[in-house]
Image (cartoon, rainbow, N blue to C red):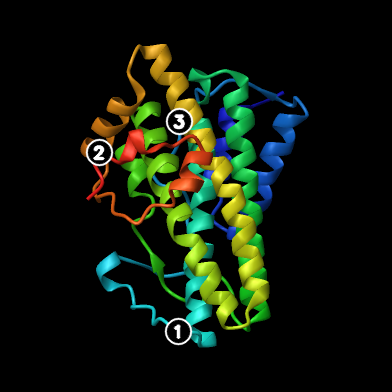
Amino acid sequence: MEVLGEVARAVLLTADPHAKRREARGLARAWRRGALVHRCDATMPDQPARPDAPELLAPSQMPRRRKGGSERGRIAMLHALAHIEFVAIDLAVDLVGRFGGEFPRAFVDDWLGVAADEAMHFALLDRRLRALGSHYGALPAHAGLWEAAEATADDALARLAIVPMVLEARGLDVTPATVERFRATGDEASARILERIYRDEIRHVGAGTRWFEWLCDERGFEPAATWQNLVKSRFRGSLKPPFNDSARRHAGLTQEYYGVIAR
């Protein structure tokens, strides 16, 4: 039988976006079939493989997206979201490959399910871009999305605190307004895709919160205070309102966590 960690490493080392998408979903299927040994001792790469396009730029070099309903603006937004979902495939797979041996099988169930979701989200967004005459890779993309993984490569608790409970949770805050902007321009097809992603991301943040609390319990830590300390020490940005308190609460991420340190 193949080994979970080795197959996860192979996904991370796959550069082509569509091959990565297929391999991530194949990894999830193989795990569900019981075709993989639950062992995660393979070394994960510091950086996943990346395709030649899109060009990756520092945040300060990224073109500013114009607000409004032009097709060009909508394409730029969809491309940015597609890049986020592409990187999210690697974030979920790396979480399993790097830390999966520290957790029960249910952890791997959850996060390979997340990886499959992110692969599906990427496919939906790229398909929509193509319907609008573009594609993933046609525009520059943010180079810094992997930084959170690098900053938390040594500790599963830190990774859970920052990636699902900060970065994905931020998606819950901003996506409803983005959906409404697309809908206001008559782009119902894009709005429906983003609504689908939003519903899935609530579940992803919920998985992050649940496993963060599980690991805190294993280590004898108080969850909210531990999360706050990790965010202060491992996250380069700041937590800024407005927050989608309802969606966060639905995911188990209550104001007890973020209300104290929000700016």
Q: Position of residue 181 (x, y in %)?
A: 51, 75
Q: Is residue 138 above or below residue 167?
A: below
Mark 1 or mark 3, earlier in chain: 3
Are the residues at dot 1 and dot 3 in contact (C-beta closer than 8 Å)?
Answer: no
Q: Secondary structure at mark 1?
A: loop
Image quadrant of residue 242?
bottom left
Q: Residue at x 52, y 44 (%)?
A: 12
Closer to the eye: label 3 or 2:
2
- Label 2 sits on what residue type? Val
Q: Secondary structure at mark 2?
A: loop
Q: Residue at x 33, y 16 (%)?
A: 221
Q: Residue at x 64, y 39 (%)?
A: 113
Badge 3 local density, few (<14 within 10 Å), some, or many (20+)?
Answer: few
Name the residue that disc number 1 marks: 68
Mark 1 or mark 2, earlier in chain: 1
Q: Is residue 92 left or right of residue 31?
A: left
Q: Position of residue 7 (x, y in %)?
A: 61, 35
Q: Quadrant of the N terminus?
A: top right
Q: Is residue 260 visible?
A: yes
Structural distance between the alpha carbons of marks 1 and 3? 45 Å
Q: Which mark is residue 260?
A: 2
- Label 3 sits on what residue type? Thr
Q: Is residue 65 left or right of residue 195?
A: left
Q: Is residue 51 left or right of residue 117?
A: left
Mark 3 or mark 2, earlier in chain: 3
Q: Secondary structure at mark 3?
A: loop
Structural distance between the alpha carbons of marks 1 and 2? 34 Å
Name the residue that disc number 3 marks: 43
- Label 1 sits on what residue type? Gly
Q: Is residue 113 above or below residue 48?
A: above
